[in-house]
C-alpha cells in the first residue's frame, strides 16, 4: 500500500506542484489549505490518516506552529516536514522544538525533498522491527545490568550494607563507582543520614585537609570563621572518598590515624571529634602497584580494603548494553522531556560492538547527544558517531587460522553467530537485533550449524 502524504499550503500552485510530484513518486497524496483543515485531516481515524505531512508555516486560521502544537499530544500523529519560505533561526528552532522531523526552505530542491520524504517514511516503517524502550528491570538503584559480573556486585552491596566496615571500590573511570557507594548507603540502616562525597582530584593538596577535617577561625590565612569538614558533615552517615589514590602522603598518614582511632581534629584545633561516619573509598588506579612504588601507604591500603568491590569495564560485560540502553534512555528522555521510545537494530548493534573506553559514563553521554539531536521518537545509527573505529570491539574472526589457511564464508558466519550469541548470553531477541536477522532465520542457522549454548 502506498504511503499517504498530506500537503498543507495556502498557495494553490504549490499544492498542485507537490501533489503532482509526489503522486508521480507513487505516494497517495491529499491536501489541505488552512490550519483547521490540516489538523482535521491529520487526525482522521482509520486508513485515511496520513503518515507524513508537508507543512507550511504561514496558513489561514492559524500558523503551522499551531498545527504542530495540536498534533503533539495526538495518538500516532503523522511525521511532519516543514516546507516554508521563513528562513530564520527562530522559526527553525521553534519548529524542531515542536516536533518537526525536518525544516526545508522554499524554493525546495526536488532531489532534497525526495530524499527527506523517503527518510521520514522509512523511519516510521522501521517501528515494527524496533526495540521499544521500557524502564529497565535489571537494576539496583541506578546500577543496571544482567550479567553475572553485575549480579555479583549486587550481592556484595547486599552483604556490605549490613555492616559499617570500610569498603574500597575499584574500577576504571566511568564504571559507576559512586553509584555503588550510594547503593551501599541506601541499602544500609543509615539511609536517612547524610551521604557526603569528596572528589579527591578536585581539591588542591593545601585545601584537601581543611575540606576533610574542617578548620577553626584563624587556623590559616583566609580562615575567617570555624568551618566543619566533610567527616563532620557526614555525621553517622557515609563519607565517600572518590579517587583516594590522589591524596598526598602526608594526608594519607592523617587519614590512617582517623580510621584507626575513630577521632579527628579540625585544622588549628586540638579538640578531638568522634568519627561516626562509615568510610567508602574508590579509585581507578592500581593501589597495589602504588604501594610497591611507595606512593601510597600500605597500612592505609589494608585499612581501606576491609571489603573490596571490583567493577568490571563495560567492554567485559557487553551483554549488559541492551538493558543499559533501556535504562539510560528512560532516564535521559525523562530528564530532557523528550520522547525517544525506539532504538533501531542497527543502532543497538553499533552500540553493542563498540569497546567503550569511557565505560558507562561515555555510553550515557553518547545517548544524551543522540536524544538531543533526534528528530523523531526513533534513535538510529546516524545519531551515534563513535569515533574512527579504533575502539570497535572485535567481532569477526582473524583473516587466517593458526595454520595460515583462510576460513570459508560459511565458517566465518558460524563463528560470528557463536560470538554474538555469547555476547547476548543466548538471548535470541538481542542476538537477532545485533545480527539484523529475524528470529526464524537465527533458529535455522543454529540448527544448520548444530550450535549449542556451551559452544559459546
Image (tube, grey):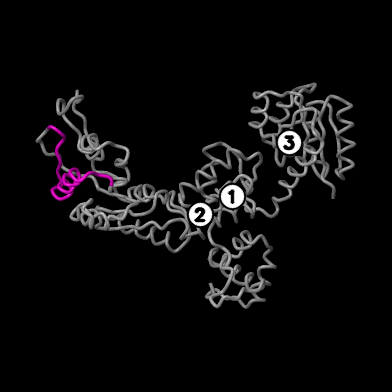
Q: Tell me the number on the disc at residue 8.
A: none
Residue 159 point in image, percent of width and height: 32, 59
For this rendering, which residue is in front, 296 or 12? 296
Residue 353 point in image, percent of width and height: 56, 57
For this rendering, which residue is in front, 339 or 23? 23
Task: Tell me which residue sits at (58%, 70%) in the image.
Answer: 418
Residue 360 point in image, percent of width and height: 46, 50
Vertical order, 427 against 242 (above or below)? below
Q: Residues at badges 3 and 1 in contact (C-beta under 8 Å)?
A: no
Residue 256 part of the magenta-drawn span: yes
Evaluate whether residue 157 shows in this view: yes
Q: Which of marks 3 and 1 is nearer the N terminus?
A: 3
Q: In this rendering, would 76 be left or right of 418?
A: right
Q: In this rendering, would 204 be left or right of 256?
A: right
Rounded to the nearest angstrom, the CA distance separating label 1 from label 2 is: 11 Å
Residues drawn in magenta: 246-268
The residue under label 1 is 133
The residue under label 2 is 137
Rounded to the nearest angstrom, the CA distance separating label 3 from label 1 is: 23 Å
Which of the two marks, 2 or 3, is nearer to us in this view?
A: 3
* Neighbourhood count class around disc 1 (C-alpha, 10 Å): few under 14, some 14–19, many 20 upward: some
Rounded to the nearest angstrom, the CA distance separating label 2 from label 3 is: 34 Å
The residue under label 3 is 80
For this rendering, which residue is in front, 407 or 50? 407
Task: Tell me which residue sits at (33%, 57%) in the image.
Answer: 309
* Label 2 residue SS: loop
Task: Tell me which residue sits at (47%, 58%) in the image.
Answer: 315
Amino acid at each position: 500500500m502506498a504511503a499517504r502524504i498530506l500537503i498543507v499550503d495556502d498557495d494553490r500552485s504549490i499544492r498542485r506542484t507537490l501533489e503532482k510530484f509526489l503522486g508521480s513518486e507513487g505516494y497517495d497524496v491529499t491536501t489541505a489549505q488552512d490550519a483547521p483543515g490540516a489538523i482535521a485531516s491529520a487526525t482522521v481515524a482509520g486508513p485515511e490518516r496520513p503518515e507524513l505531512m508537508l507543512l507550511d508555516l504561514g496558513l489561514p486560521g492559524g500558523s503551522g506552529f499551531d498545527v504542530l502544537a495540536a498534533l503533539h499530544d495526538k495518538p500516532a500523529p503523522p511525521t511532519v516536514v516543514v516546507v516554508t519560505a521563513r528562513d530564520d533561526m527562530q522559526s527553525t528552532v521553534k519548529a524542531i522544538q515542536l516536533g518537526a522531523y525536518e525544516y526545508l526552505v522554499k524554493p525546495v530542491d526536488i532531489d532534497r525533498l525526495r530524499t527527506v520524504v523517503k527518510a521520514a517514511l522509512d523511519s516510521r516503517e522501521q517501528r515494527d522491527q524496533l526495540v521499544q524502550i521500557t524502564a529497565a528491570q535489571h537494576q539496583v538503584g541506578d546500577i543496571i545490568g544482567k550479567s553475572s559480573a553485575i549480579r555479583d556486585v549486587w550481592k556484595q552491596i547486599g552483604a556490605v550494607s549490613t555492616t559499617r566496615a570500610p569498603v574500597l571500590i575499584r574500577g576504571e573511570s566511568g564504571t559507576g563507582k559512586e553509584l555503588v557507594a550510594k547503593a551501599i548507603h541506601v541499602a544500609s540502616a543509615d539511609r536517612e543520614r547524610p551521604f557526603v562525597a569528596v572528589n579527591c582530584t578536585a581539591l588542591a593538596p593545601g585545601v584537601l585537609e581543611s575540606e576533610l577535617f574542617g578548620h577553626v577561625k584563624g587556623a590559616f590565612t583566609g580562615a575567617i570563621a570555624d568551618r566543619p569538614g566533610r567527616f563532620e558533615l557526614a555525621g553517622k552517615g557515609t563519607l565517600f572518598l572518590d579517587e583516594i589514590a590522589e591524596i598526598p602522603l602526608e594526608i594519607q598518614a592523617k587519614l590512617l590515624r582517623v580510621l584507626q582511632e575513630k577521632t579527628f581534629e579540625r585544622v588549628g584545633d586540638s579538640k578531638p571529634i568522634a568519627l561516626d561516619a562509615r568510610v567508602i573509598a574508590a579509585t581507578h588506579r592500581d593501589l597495589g602497584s602504588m604501594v610497591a612504588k611507595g606512593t601510597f601507604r600500605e597500612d592505609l591500603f589494608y585499612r581501606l580494603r576491609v571489603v573490596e568491590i571490583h567493577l568490571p569495564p563495560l567492554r567485559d560485560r557487553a551483554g549488559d548494553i541492551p538493558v543499559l540502553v533501556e535504562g539510560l534512555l528512560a532516564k535521559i528522555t525523562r530528564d530532557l522531556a523528550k520522547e525517544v521510545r525506539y532504538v533501531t537494530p542497527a543502532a543497538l548493534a553499533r552500540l553493542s560492538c563498540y569497546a567503550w573506553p569511557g565505560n558507562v559514563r561515555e555510553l550515557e553521554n553518547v545517548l544524551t547527544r543522540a536524544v538531543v539531536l533526534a528528530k523523531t521518537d526513533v534513535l538510529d545509527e546516524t545519531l551515534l558517531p563513535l569515533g574512527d573505529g579504533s575502539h570497535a570491539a572485535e567481532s569477526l574472526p582473524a583473516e587466517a587460522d593458526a595454520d595460515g589457511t583462510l576460513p570459508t564464508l560459511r565458517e566465518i558466519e558460524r563463528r560470528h553467530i557463536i560470538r554474538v550469541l555469547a555476547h547476548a548470553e543466548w538471548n535470541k531477541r538481542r542476538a537477532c537485533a545485533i545480527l539484523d536477522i529475524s528470529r526464524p532465520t537465527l533458529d535455522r542457522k543454529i540448527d544448520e550449524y548444530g550450535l549449542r549454548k556451551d559452544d559459546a
